[in-house]
Image (cartoon, rainbow, N blue to C red):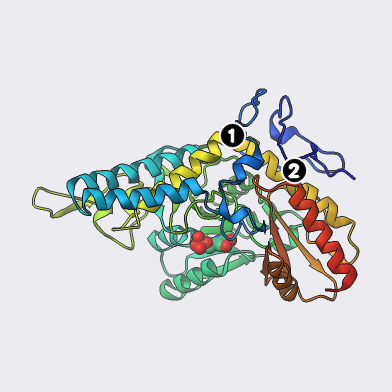
């Protein structure tokens, strides 16, 4: 059986036109939601590098089946080399020399640019952070909260973000409302469920663009519009851990207020570099919580005189700057390999392929009853310990993760994934079901 999107073989051959991806419809599948900012119609361009060759640059992909991109992406040899070169250069210049500091300043600027290009915004809207969580915390703690303000969060957010919201509520006397979006995975209306819980005092909605547990893609543009219709003053903080590097994005058009992401997952950058997009109109309203030399202006005597007037206002101090170079190289490689739409198209087709295979395995149930819309496929196996399964698979060098709520196994499909890997995984799972591990 050929799965939807199977073009046969692992070397990607792009269709003559992939068209506006929102219009593509595979047999037996839904059309994609209209939540993505789409690229113009693609031409006949093929990616310059065959996937098999390209993948050889990733040491982590050479000896295992890797399906954990939503946890951490693999680093390419080029990114690793760039990091090492950058560290070496600092030592050659002399750490803290004028040349080294100029180089650091240049790397900060280039990293803003690389990220901004990928997200469709200008570089001055980006704050460099070390993780998704750091970005969320900048927005959460930087708003002018008052006792009694309400904050709405979905029931599918990451524990680190939930904990930050709870502590925020304890310190400032906020009311937390929880929106049950998990139940809208297969039926129901996520937009309505969120919008109907917005009250007059709701100041902030915290939600993920792609739910990290079930893989559901929330129709963010619609949600933003619906929330603002309910309360024009409400702000939205988006956890973009699972969407950056997956969906073609144009944040300037999407108009989210805060969009927090990391480079170390789907972008395959080094761990320790992430970012936060802040809608320009909010720049002055948000106050920095952690403060240091990177976010301030100083006078001739070094005295602080005010905040920087761009995203660096929320950057703090010394970071592992050579890692920035690694993220730039990682992003550049993606861009050379294919446009965001091409990359997403492949992720989408591979996820559908796996999902289709899994439908044929008895006692295995994908959480989503319809084909997936992005790179996460979560499933449960009747009567089996998912924890044990993940461990057994890891022993066989097949990497994926356990999710606690809902209890399931999550598989991540990247554009780097091969069709043959998807097929092997499905076959392994079938054998495991048959032999009951
Ligand atoms: C939805 C979501 N939010 C936050 C995080 C935490 O990411 P980070 O370690 O970059 O803060 C993750 C990590 O898996 C995630 O999936």
Is 60 positioned to the left or the right of 299 in the image? Answer: right
Q: In which quarter of the image is the C terminus?
A: bottom right
SS of the residue under disc 1 = loop
Q: Residue at x 50, y 49 (%)?
A: 77
Closer to the camera, 389 or 167?
389
Q: Residue at x 63, y 53 (%)?
A: 62
> Residue 86 location, x and y as percent?
34, 49
Is 67 positioned to the left or the right of 92 in the image? Answer: right
> Residue 316 location, x and y as percent?
31, 58
Is 292 positioned to the left or the right of 4 in the image? Answer: left
User: Looking at the image, is 117 positioned above or below residue 361?
Assistant: above
User: Looking at the image, is 136 positioned above or below residue 85?
Assistant: below
Of the image marks 2 and 1, the number of the one nearer the N terminus = 1
> Ligand 1 within 8 A of label 2's CB?
no
SS of the residue under disc 2 = helix
Closer to the camera, 384 or 398?
398
Tag 2 residue: 349
User: Would you say residue 247 is visible in this rendering?
Assistant: no
Tag 1 residue: 339
Corner quadrant of residue 2? top right
Ligand 1: which quarter?
bottom right
The answer to whether the residue labelled 2 contacts the one labelled 1, judged by CB atoms less than 8 Å apart, is no
Closer to the camera, 201 or 161?
161
């Amino acid at each position: 059986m050929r799965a939807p999107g199977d073009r046969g073989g692992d070397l990607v051959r792009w269709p003559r036109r992939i068209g506006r991806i929102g219009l593509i419809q595979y047999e037996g599948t839904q059309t994609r939601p209209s939540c993505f900012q789409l690229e113009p119609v693609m031409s006949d361009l093929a990616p310059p590098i065959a996937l098999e060759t390209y993948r050889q640059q990733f040491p982590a992909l050479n000896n295992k089946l890797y399906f954990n991109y939503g946890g951490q992406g693999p680093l390419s040899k080029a990114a690793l080399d760039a990091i090492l070169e950058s560290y070496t250069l600092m030592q050659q210049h002399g750490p803290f020399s004028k040349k080294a500091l100029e180089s650091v300043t240049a790397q900060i600027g280039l990293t803003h640019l690389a990220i901004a290009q990928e997200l469709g915004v200008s570089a001055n809207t980006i704050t460099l952070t070390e993780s998704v969580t750091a970005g969320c915390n900048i927005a959460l703690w930087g708003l002018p909260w008052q006792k009694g303000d309400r904050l709405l969060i979905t029931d599918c957010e990451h524990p680190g973000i939930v904990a930050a919201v709870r502590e925020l509520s304890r310190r400032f006397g906020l009311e937390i409302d929880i929106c049950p979006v998990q139940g809208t995975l297969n039926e129901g209306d996520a937009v309505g469920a969120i919008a109907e819980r917005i009250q007059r005092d709701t100041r902030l909605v915290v939600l993920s663009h792609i739910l990290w547990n079930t893989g559901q893609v929330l129709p963010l543009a619609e949600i933003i519009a619906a929330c603002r219709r309910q309360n024009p003053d409400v702000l939205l903080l988006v956890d973009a851990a699972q969407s950056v590097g997956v969906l073609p994005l144009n944040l300037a058009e999407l108009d989210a207020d805060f969009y927090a992401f990391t480079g170390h997952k789907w972008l395959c950058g080094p761990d320790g570099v992430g970012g936060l997009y802040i809608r320009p109109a909010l720049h002055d309203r948000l106050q920095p919580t952690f403060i240091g030399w990177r976010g301030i202006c100083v006078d001739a005597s070094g005295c602080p005189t005010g905040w920087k007037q761009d995203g660096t206002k929320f950057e703090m101090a010394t970071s592992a700057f050579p890692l920035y170079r690694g993220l730039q190289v990682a992003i550049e490689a993606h861009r050379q390999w294919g446009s965001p739409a091409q990359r997403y198209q492949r992720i989408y087709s591979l996820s559908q392929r796996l999902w289709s295979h899994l439908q044929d395995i008895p006692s295995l149930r994908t959480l989503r009853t319809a084909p997936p819309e992005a790179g996460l496929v979560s499933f449960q196996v009747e009567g089996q310990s998912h924890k044990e399964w993940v461990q057994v698979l890891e022993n066989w060098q097949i990497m994926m993760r356990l999710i606690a709520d809902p209890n399931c196994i999550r598989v991540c499909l990247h554009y780097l994934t091969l069709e043959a890997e998807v097929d092997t995984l499905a076959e392994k799972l079938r054998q495991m079901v048959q032999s009951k591990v």
